[in-house]
Image (spheres, rainbow, N blue to C red):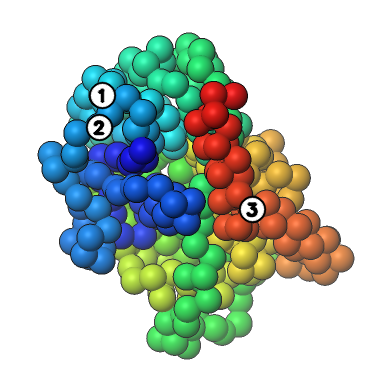
Amino acid sequence: MKIIQILTTISFGDAVSNDTIALRDALLQMGYETAIYAENIDPRLPKGTAKKVKYMPPLGKDDVILYHLSTGTELNYKVAKYQTKKILVYHSVTPPEFFLPYSQAAAQLCQYGLDGAKYLADKMDYCLADSEFNKNDLLEMGYQCPVDVLPILIAFEDYKKAPSRKVLRKYRTEGTNILFTGRIAPNKRQEDVIAAFYHYKKYYDPKARLFLVGSYAGMESYYAKLWSYVEELGVQDVYFTGHIKFDEILAYYHLADVFLCTSEHEGFCVPLVEAMYFQVPVIAYDCAAIGGTLGGSGLLVSDKDPLLLAGAVNRLRTDDELRNAILENQKIRLQSFEQSRVKAQFVDYLTGFLKGK
């Protein structure tokens, strides 16, 4: 029996691709014949990581496909035609309305993705959603097959690599460092982080810095809007890094005093877990999968009023008892995402599915 994984694009360093590679390793450890197939393969990946979908071998009815869905693609429709056992690994699709003011193409791609997900509702044998939020999405789309929750597999070993000394030297100075990581995209609402930073800098720490770490490729109009907002506020020390090297990303986590997330749509939000790993206290808006990923840790807020957020940042900077309590809770929550634990959960789910439970 072959168990193969299919996805649209396998990239260097993104969460879905890392999850796919980690699941491949788990399948190999279980003794299965397995491989990854994708329409697009990042050339930076080690040779042999994945093969083009067109080279996929014939599959029998006892073989299994793990299909990763996170965007709009024809594969969402083609995968239904395979006469095999099919498992959907659902990573969420951002609602298109977030992108409509900035990119018609991005909005259409998201809508195509949601349409594809709905199309597959009666064509899958089993589903793994990486959050309870995503599971509920599938149920609302009409999925009748069993759906279980399996967190994204995160390669914590990578975080032990050396951070960029250049970045550390440049910013390891007096002043609070506020961080948000994630691509520059309208669903992530970086403007709300900027507004909170403006008030924090004005009322609490004039030497504070804000680092918005993430690529803005394809979202140049939204990025331009954010810069215009920064200029309108007249706030200094806001840094957009754009796409950067991994050791530089690590450096910003090492520098951060607070991780501030005001996103309005996340299917899981790996950066929250990264912040936990680097012992950076999290303040996050309670929306979509955010609360589920934090799992009772961090400081979850239901109001994005910038003055309140600024006050929350200041509280974490001045109240050692609160900060330490939050960090301790984050440390406990982090254990839920340990690779060995998530892999064991995957093995249990897959074994149960194959046995027909």
Of the two numbered discs 2 and 3 in the rendering, the one whose residue sits closer to the viewer = 2
Percent across and percent down for residue 51 are 20, 50
Front-most of 310 and 22? 22
Task: Residue under label 1, please give it.
Answer: 82
Front-most of 143 and 161? 143
Front-most of 48 and 276? 48
Residue 127 makes an appearance in the image: yes
Residue at 44% in and 52% down: 31
Of helix, strand and loop, which one carries label 1? loop
Q: Earlier in the sequence, mark 2 or mark 3?
A: 2
The residue type indicated by label 2 comes to Leu
Q: Is there CB contact under 8 Å for labels 2 and 1?
A: yes
Please rate how many residues cluster around mark 2, counting C-alpha atoms within 10 Å: few if below 14, some from 14 to 19, many from 20: some
Q: Is residue 18 left or right of residue 82?
A: right
Of helix, strand and loop, which one carries label 2? loop
Residue 283 makes an appearance in the image: no
Quarter of the image for residue 327 reads: bottom right
Of helix, strand and loop, which one carries label 3? helix
Q: Is residue 258 left or right of residue 109?
A: right
Quarter of the image for residue 86 reads: top left
Q: CA distance from mark 2 to mark 3?
A: 30 Å
Quarter of the image for residue 202 reads: bottom right
In this rendering, the answer to whether 228 lies above or below 126 is: below
The residue type indicated by label 1 comes to Tyr
Percent across and percent down for residue 355 are 54, 29
Percent across and percent down for residue 167 are 43, 81
Residue at 47% in and 82% down: 162
Quarter that holds the C terminus: top right
Of the two numbered discs 1 and 3 in the rendering, the one whose residue sits closer to the viewer = 1
Q: Earlier in the sequence, mark 2 or mark 1?
A: 2
Task: Residue under label 3, please give it.
Answer: 341
Task: Residue under label 2, please give it.
Answer: 59
